[in-house]
Image (cartoon, coloured by chain):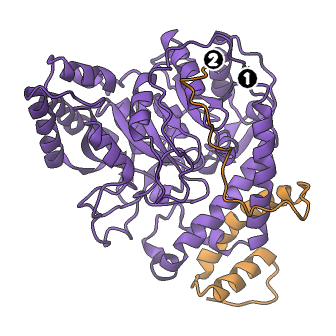
């Protein structure tokens, strides 16, 4: 694993640092490929940055798309 | 031809004595042997087990016992389901050294109770991270309608086996579109139930907060029959929210009168190519569904699904990535590593967004019962395609196949993918998503059944050069 603190590509520098922190050995070639993917995800994550979220908008509830219904479809078809 | 029959017909024919389960199984095995060298859908064959199960069905009938709903129906499963006695591959090489499963996955247990006969396990993208089933370890799964093209993924083997007439019924998983994408590209019906409907116990996870399991078939009735057989609470699966069964098979022919059906626009037009838009329009016209319905925050939901998937999958596989990265699928290992390293804030923001998004989606269904959207941006691409053209822009081929499915599964809604043939059945199929509110699989299946009954949607067995 290489470590170049003055890396002109901040995502590459991040990948190298994070990989070292996570004990994940990466060759320079792997770093290059991972940077391509992380850059794609970074662009998508940036769109979420603009979504309005308040401090109380938290995901503590175990995800459930809606409460399980009390009435069966067979009893109340549309 | 026995292998062209759907599961319901097979079960009925065995029940009334026109066919024996062992005769059906022999035909199925013969079809697999004849076509799989071209398709590469099967990674494991469980023919000895199948012979025992088929013989038990025939013996039961000979004793005059009532047969369950799927008695004698051959089926196969994506190789991330536990099958007793086999190592669960999940499309990988690194899991092959693990101990064989000590029991079948819950859904296989339920299908066995319904009399179905397991014939094998099916090809998939490694760890379900892909939309093309170009598996480097066992070879690409090929689309039965054009073997130069992909079957879609990640449940590519599950869709291809049904399209090739190898089995009438298969199971797959869908995290971001992995049932709906291969259904679309292989021209078969697929059901992604509500998140939390079916037990996932005994299946190898990909993204725990998004993983769904469901069936593929060549008819809507078969989807409903198998779905009913698999329903039931499972307190041992923390993601199984259903507290009882809600059978739908008796409802699929109830018609669509009174249903408020609309067609999605905006994002779902912008991210669809000409064939996909044409298929969605065909379905909308047949159902008299007005166009122009806007799904809330679709692009943001796709982004959030992408981020969530990368984080959860990367974190899940990090221990093996440290030691065995070289043995992972070359097409997805770098994405897994990127996911394992991405900032926690991205993931948390995606999850916080998800609750607000869910509420907006549920609010939309106060005005609509069922919504329509294309399932994939384009028809099946040639194996090895790196980019395809989408409305004038080149996009990366493998992740972009899920552009239209990811926003829907991120809300957890049930979807039936139905196969349409906008350029005729001699050309390639493409699917339409029939989307309902959470827990209303019955409505999506009724609309799918109407399209099937009217001849708008169909899943013919691929000719495979015959």
| Residue beneath the point at 71% across and 71% down | B342
Residue B393 position, x and y percent, is 75, 41
The reply to whether residue B40 is visible in this rendering is no
Dot 1: few (<14), some (14–19), or many (≥20) neighbours within 10 Å? many
Residues tagged 2 and 1 counted as in contact (Cβ below 8 A): yes
Question: Can I make out residue B79 in this image?
Answer: yes
Which chain is in purple here? B
- Residue B194 percent across, percent down from the top left: 58, 41
Locate the N terminus of chain B and report the quarter of the image it occupies. Answer: top left
Q: Which chain is orange?
A: A
Left-right relation of B278 to B252: right
Mark sitting earlier along the chain (2/1):
1
Quarter assignment of residue B113: top left
Vertical comparison of B139 with A15: above or below: above
Image position, residue B191 (x, y; %)? 51, 35
- Give the chain of mark 2: B
Chain letter of mark 1 equals B
**Dot 2: what SS?**
helix
The residue drawn where x is 68% and y is 18% is B281
Q: Which residue is mark 1?
A: B263
Give the image location of residue B363, x and y in percent.
80, 36
Q: Which residue is mark 2?
A: B283
């Amino acid at each position: 694993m290489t470590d170049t603190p003055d890396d002109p590509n901040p995502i590459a520098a991040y990948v190298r640092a994070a990989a070292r922190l996570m004990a994940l050995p990466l060759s320079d070639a792997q770093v290059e490929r991972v940077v391509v993917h992380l850059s794609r995800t970074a662009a998508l994550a940036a769109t979420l940055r603009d979504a309005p979220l308040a401090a109380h908008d938290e995901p503590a509830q175990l995800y459930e798309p809606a409460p399980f219904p009390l009435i069966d479809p067979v009893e109340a078809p549309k | 031809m026995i292998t062209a029959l759907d599961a319901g017909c097979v079960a009925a024919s065995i029940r009334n004595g026109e066919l024996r389960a062992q005769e059906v199984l022999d035909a199925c095995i013969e079809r697999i042997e004849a076509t799989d060298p071209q398709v590469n859908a099967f990674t494991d064959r469980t023919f000895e087990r199948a012979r025992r199960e088929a013989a038990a069905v025939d013996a039961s009938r000979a004793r005059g016992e009532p047969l369950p709903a799927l008695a004698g129906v051959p089926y196969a499963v994506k190789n991330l389901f536990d099958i007793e006695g086999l190592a669960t591959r999940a499309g990988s090489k690194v899991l092959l050294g693990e101990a064989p499963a000590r029991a079948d996955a819950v859904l296989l247990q339920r299908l066995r109770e319904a009399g179905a006969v397991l014939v094998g396990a099916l090809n998939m993208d490694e760890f379900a991270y892909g939309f093309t089933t170009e598996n480097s370890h066992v070879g690409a799964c090929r689309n039965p309608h054009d073997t130069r093209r992909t079957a879609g993924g990640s449940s590519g083997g599950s869709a291809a086996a049904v399209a090739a007439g190898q089995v009438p019924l298969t199971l797959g998983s869908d995290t971001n579109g992995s049932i709906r994408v291969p259904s679309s590209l292989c021209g078969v019906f697929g059901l992604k139930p509500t998140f939390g409907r079916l037990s996932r116990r005994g299946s190898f996870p990909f993204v725990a907060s998004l993983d769904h399991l469901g069936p593929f078939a060549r008819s809507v009735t078969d989807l409903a029959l198998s779905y009913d057989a698999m329903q039931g609470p499972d307190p041992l699966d923390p993601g199984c929210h259903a507290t009882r069964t809600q059978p739908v098979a008796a409802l699929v022919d109830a018609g669509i009168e009174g249903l408020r059906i609309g067609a999605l626009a905006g994002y779902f037009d912008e991210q669809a190519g000409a064939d996909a838009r044409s298929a969605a329009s065909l379905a909308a016209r047949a159902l008299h569904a007005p166009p122009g319905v806007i799904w809330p925050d679709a692009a943001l939901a796709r982004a959030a699904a992408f981020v969530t998937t990368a984080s959860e999958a990367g974190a899940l596989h990090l221990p093996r990535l440290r030691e065995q990265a070289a043995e992972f699928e070359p097409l997805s290992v770098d994405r897994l590593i990127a996911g394992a390293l991405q900032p926690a804030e991205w993931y948390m923001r995606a999850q916080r967004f998800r609750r607000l998004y869910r509420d907006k989606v549920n609010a939309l269904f106060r005005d609509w019962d069922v919504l329509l959207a294309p399932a994939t941006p384009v028809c099946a691409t040639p194996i090895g395609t790196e980019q395809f053209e989408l409305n004038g822009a080149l996009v990366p081929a493998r992740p972009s196949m899920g552009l239209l499915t990811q926003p829907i599964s991120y809300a957890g809604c049930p979807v039936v993918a139905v196969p349409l043939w906008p350029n005729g059945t001699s050309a390639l199929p493409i699917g339409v998503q029939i989307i309902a509110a959470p827990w209303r699989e019955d409505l999506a299946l009724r609309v799918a059944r109407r399209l099937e009954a009217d001849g708008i949607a169909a899943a013919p067995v691929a000719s495979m050069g015959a």
